[in-house]
Image: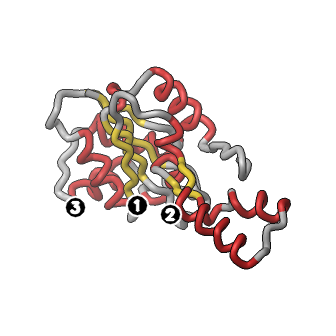
Amino acid sequence: MSDLTTTLPTNDLATDFATVDALEEALQSERYITDRSLATTLYLTLALRKPLLLEGEAGVGKTEIAKVLASVLGAPLIRLQCYEGLDASSAIYEWDYPRQMLYLRSLEATGDLQREEVQRNLFAEEFLLKRPLLQAIDAAHTQSPVLLIDEVDRADQELEAFLLEILSDFQVTVPELGT
């Protein structure tokens, strides 16, 4: 079983904890007892702004560390639960087709069907349903979220490859909207 925990670099997380000891104390304040090697690893993850892969048996606290880390950082926790058959598009975004259809119907009813405007507005951000990966890298966050990708070992190889790509660049392209 594997969980991938990462904090995303929209602000300076390393300044939250000047030392490994400070991070360890913060974790303990949330009733999470850690050994020195895990505390050091978490500190370096934050300082270097890199993802962290935690492996281990069920019930050893992999998911809990993401929850506690989000709590001590005062950051939102965004969770992507992996399973066989989960594809990249479902993990990133979907279009709100019912709302898009209502939009088209309202334009038809008012007679405002100007082709260029419809094409531009039909795939506007207001119709975009952000899934966990897009939520996590959304620049609108005031605090970097902690992204928990749970059960990553259950994901298909295609999704695993995509996760590696998105976690190296921390960006995604929505063809209709851009990067």
Q: Amino acid at mark 3?
A: Ser
Mark 3, Cα crowd under 10 Å, few <14 / some 14-19 / many 20+, is: few
The disc label shown at residue 29, or none: 3
Colour pattern of the rendering: secondary structure
Q: Quadrant of the N terminus?
A: top left
Front position among marks 2 and 3: 2
Q: Secondary structure at mark 1?
A: loop
Marks 2/3: CA distance?
20 Å
Residue placed at 50% from the left, 63% from the top?
143
* Quadrant in the rendering for residue 30: bottom left
The disc label shown at residue 135, or none: none
Residue bearing the label numbered 2 = 143
Mark 1, Cα crowd under 10 Å, few <14 / some 14-19 / many 20+, is: some
* Quadrant in the rendering for residue 85: top left
Q: Secondary structure at mark 3?
A: helix
Earlier sequence position, callout 1 versus callout 3: 3
Earlier sequence position, callout 2 versus callout 3: 3
* Quadrant in the rendering for residue 114: bottom right
Which is more toward the observer, 103 or 130? 103
Front position among marks 1 and 3: 1
Residue placed at 48% from the left, 51% from the top?
131
Residue bearing the label numbered 1 = 76
Mark 2, Cα crowd under 10 Å, few <14 / some 14-19 / many 20+, is: some
Q: Secondary structure at mark 2?
A: loop
Relative to 69, say whether 111 is above or below. Answer: below
Which is more toward the observer, 14 or 139? 139
Residue placed at 41% from the left, 34% from the top?
86
Earlier sequence position, callout 2 versus callout 1: 1
Locate residue 144 relative to residue 67 in the image: left or right.
Answer: right
